[in-house]
Amino acid sequence: MLEISGLTKRYGETLALSEATIRFRPGTIHTILGENGSGKSTLVKLLSGIVAPDSGTILMEGRAVTARNPAGFRKAGFATAFQEVLIAPDRSVTDNILLGLDGLFRRHIPREARRARAEAVLSRFACTRIDPDALAGALPLASQQLVVLARAVARDPRVLILDEITAALDFADRDSVFAFMKRTAATGAALLFITHRMDEVMALSDDISVLRSGQVVRSGPRGDAAPADLLALMAPEGGRHG
Ligand SMILES: Nc1ncnc2c1ncn2[C@@H]1O[C@H](COP(=O)(O)OP(=O)(O)O)[C@@H](O)[C@H]1O
Ligand SMILES: [Mg+2]
């Protein structure tokens, strides 16, 4: 469904992602595992049109994705919940979730219908109740994270990218988000789940790719990969995990 090939991104002297080649299958959760600074968010940004690759290709169903901005990637079926919680603090939860979705027609959709739509999206994965009329900036960080996730989910994307989204969530929301992810994969979407937490990897992954210093050092079905093997792959040359 989605295939990246030789994808490379430099920031000045830093080779953030080097010749990354990964195949993502529909109907699966594909975990991208790596330590801080290994290039996970760079990959996410390349697959969201936030940054452009220096070289390499992104193929969706065999066709090159030529979009060079977030709107183009959204149109191609990608949606991303970014690691940095990006909300419009002075707008309502509903506005934040439907941001850019109802576009030109916004004024013509009754307020109640927009509110109901935002609530319906949240109810797909959130245990915590969030007032759709609340100002997003006034919510606790965990709720803001759920709003950011709802914005991605509201688009019903074919490729849903979740970058370290569980960091701020409590256990109940984390579990319900995981259950939602499994249900969504079962509908045929491809999920990219970015994390550095081994318990989450073991709970969710169909496929696992490991990044180390910008390089893909493992990519493919989870198989019988054990946590210790994955940790060893993640560790910098000569490094050790304790
Ligand atoms: N905008 C940027 N400018 C300069 N260096 C960056 C930028 N973004 C990321 N980097 C560097 O690229 C490398 C990969 O970063 P990142 O993709 O954010 O890693 P991860 O998400 O795995 O923690 C790191 O060395 C980081 O410092
Ligand atoms: Mg990151």
Image (cartoon, helix red, strand yellow):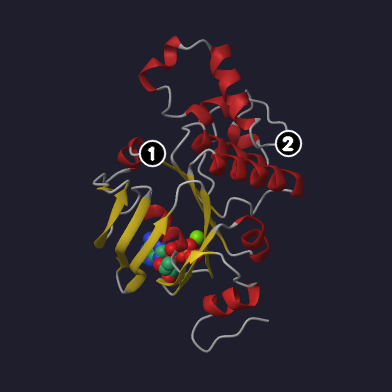
Identify the residue shown where x is 54% and y is 18%.
114
Ligand 1 shown in quarter: bottom left
Q: In terms of sequence position, does the residue under pointer 1 or pointer 2 come before the other?
A: 1
Check disc 2 and report the residue beneath it: 128
Quadrant of the snapshot with the C terminus: bottom right
Q: Quadrant of residue 232?
A: bottom right
Task: Assign a secondary structure to mark 1.
Answer: loop
State which mark lies toward you, 1 or 2: 1
The three-letter code of the residue at mark 1 reads: Gly
**Front residue of 70 and 123:** 123
**Front residue of 183 and 151:** 183
- Residue 200: where, in percent of width, then height? 65, 59
- Residue 146: where, in percent of width, then height? 62, 40
- Residue 57: where, in percent of width, then height? 26, 57
Dot 2 surroundings within 10 Å: few (below 14), some, or many (20 or more)?
A: some
- Residue 207 visible to the viewer: yes
Callout count: 2
The three-letter code of the residue at mark 2 reads: Thr
Identify the residue shown where x is 30% and y is 39%.
72
Q: Is residue 181 above or below residue 203?
A: above
- Residue 121: where, in percent of width, then height? 59, 29
- Residue 141 visible to the viewer: no
Q: Quadrant of residue 44?
A: bottom left
Check disc 1 and report the residue beneath it: 77
